[in-house]
Every structure is written in C-alpha cells, then in structure tokens.
Image (cartoon, grey):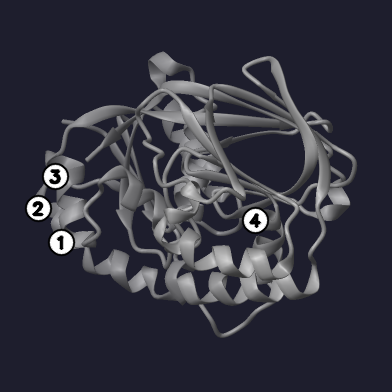
Amino acid sequence: MSKIKLIFNPYSDRGRSGQKASDLRAIVEEHGGADWVGTEHPTHATDLAAKAGLEGYDTVVAMGGDGTVHEVINGLMRVAPNHRPKLAIVPIGSGNDFAYASGVNMDPIQAMMRVFKGTARPIDVGSIRDNNNRLEYWNNTVGIGLDGKINIMSRKITGLYGFILYFTATLRTVLQDYESSHMKIWIDDQPVDEHDVLMFTFGNGPREGGGFLTTPASKIDDGIFDYVSIKHISRISILQLIPKVMNGTHVTDKRVTIGTFKKIRLEADRALPIHTDGELWSPYEVNTRTVEAEMMAGAVQLIT
C-alpha cells in the first residue's frame, strides 16, 4: 500500500479550506487512509514535503491553492530524484491556476479520488536564482516588473479575492507604479536583446492571477518554457492590452514579444519586483537585479 502524506493549508480560500479538507476525510479513509498535517506558517509546506521525502512517503498531496502547491514542490525538489515522492493536488484554494494547467479535476472530491486511482506523469519544474544567490523553484509562472508590482499591490487590497483582486491590483499598479527597467537578456546562453522592459513573465502553465492567460501556449510537460515580454509602452496602451491578456490574444499584438527558452538570464538597471507562482519572491528591498531561470524537465511526477 502506498504511503501518503496530505499537506493542507487551513488558511486557503479565506480560511474555508479547513472545512473542505474535513469533508474529504471520509474519501481518504475509504481508500486506505493517509497521514494528515496542516501548515502553521509560510514555507511550512516546503519543510513538511521535504521531510515526507526523507521519511519514505510515496506521494505528497498538496491541498490548498497555488501557494500550497508552490511550497510543496519546493520541498520535493530538496529530495534526491530517486527518493522524490510523487505529487498530487487537491484544489481547495481561491486561485488554483496550476491545478487548471495540470488537468487536475477542479472538484475537490474527484481530485481526492484521483490521488488513489490516478496515474502519474512527469512535469517540468523551473529554478530561479538571483544576484543574492537565492534559489527558488517554480512550477507555474514567474512575473517580473509590472507582473511583480501587481503582486505587491494585491497584498495591499482587502476584501477582494481571486481574479477580481488581481484585476483591481492591475489597474491600481498601472496608475500608481508605472516604471520600466532597462534589461539585458540572454536566452539559452545567447545575448538576444537590450531595451526598456515593462513586464517579463516566464510560463510553465498558461494562467496566473486566477484567470489571466499570460502565457497561453505553455504546457507543463513539454520540456520548454514560454515567455512574454512587453517593452515600455504608454499607460493607455497597457490598459488596451489587459482584456487581451485575460483571454490570451495579446500574443499576436505587435507590442508584445513572445518566445521559448530552457535557460534565461536577465540583468536590470534597478531592483526587480518578482513573484514566483503568485508568491512574492523579490520585493524591492531585496534589490534583485540579475536573475537566471532554468528548465528541469520531468523533475516531478504528478498524479492526475
């Protein structure tokens, strides 16, 4: 019988995930049971997932939203590949963008049943390192510049959640914090460009912010990452682009540059605000000016 660790975030979905997790216990017991543990503080799921690998668990289940999945994957990546547990996701958060990209059933009951009856397939994971030698793993998107600023702004807004929160944060950021960074860009070790960049987003999955299709062509298991870059344009122009980003049609706009990479390096003339999978990784005070991201193809086995 498989040894399964269930890690759930009781604070996901405005604190309602604890009850959702409780409602799923009967399904778990019907299928032989599992060991449950709740997170108590930020990054706790990372430590718990890494510990599960060391303790010989076969599967680690991330029960929560995108933040919980991000932390669990960071924990799994601490475990040697030959001992790394498989990953399963039960989406009980407010965003669940990576679950959407993964083909996970968005009904928590059905998703929990797949933990026991599903099959595993390899998915890609990215690493990102900055000039301060900080290392993080990411599984869905990395947002740099405007994308990172929107993440910072979203944390200042109360009473809104999911897509509406990020849409509101986007409008406020465009009005209040609209600066570009001069960047030098290398893709797969080749210098490709140098210009003023408003926003640069890496994509393993197509969707972020509860519904923005920022990198719509991204697939989590194709061995390559997508990127979207927007040079400095007027506020009016970016406001015109926002509806297109919502449905993924911005990639055909001449103001947008798209491409793919397995390795990328960015050097900027100022501090870069950065989120990884919706988690704020680099606020301004960290002073991140150089980042390198790299593909780790098939690094995690995902059960769906």
Q: Position of residue 109 (x, y in %)?
A: 18, 60
Residue nearest the viewer, comparing 135 with 45: 135
Mark before the other along the chain sequence, 3 or 4 = 3
Q: Dot 4 lies on which element?
A: helix
- Check whether the beta carbons of the residues at disc 2 and disc 4 lie within 8 A of each other: no
Q: In this figure, which residue is indicated by the disc labeled 2?
A: 30
Marks 2 and 4 sit apart, C-alpha to C-alpha, by 43 Å
* Amino acid residing under circle 3: Gly
Marks 3 and 2 sit apart, C-alpha to C-alpha, by 6 Å
**177 versus 158 height, above or below:** above
Q: Can you tell which of label 3 and label 4 is closer to the viewer? A: 4
Q: Position of residue 91 (x, y in %)?
A: 33, 58
For this orientation, the residue located farthest to the front is: 254
- Check whether the beta carbons of the residues at disc 1 and disc 2 lie within 8 A of each other: yes
Q: In this figure, which residue is indicated by the disc labeled 4?
A: 147
Regarding residue 12, the answer to whether it shows in the image is yes
* Amino acid residing under circle 2: Glu
Mark before the other along the chain sequence, 1 or 4 = 1
- Check whether the beta carbons of the residues at disc 3 and disc 1 lie within 8 A of each other: no
Q: Can you tell which of label 2 and label 4 is closer to the viewer? A: 4
Identify which residue is drawn at 72% across, 60% down.
Answer: 149
Marks 1 and 2 sit apart, C-alpha to C-alpha, by 6 Å
Mark before the other along the chain sequence, 2 or 4 = 2
Q: Position of residue 134 (x, y in %)?
A: 75, 33
Q: Which mark is residue 32?
A: 3
Identify which residue is drawn at 41% across, 23% down.
Answer: 223
Q: Quadrant of residue 304?
A: top left
Is the residue marked by circle 4 packed among few (<14), some (14-19), or many (20+) residues within 10 Å?
many
Regarding residue 37, the answer to whether it shows in the image is no
* Amino acid residing under circle 1: Ala
Q: Which mark is residue 26?
A: 1
Residue nearest the viewer, comparing 50 with 88: 88
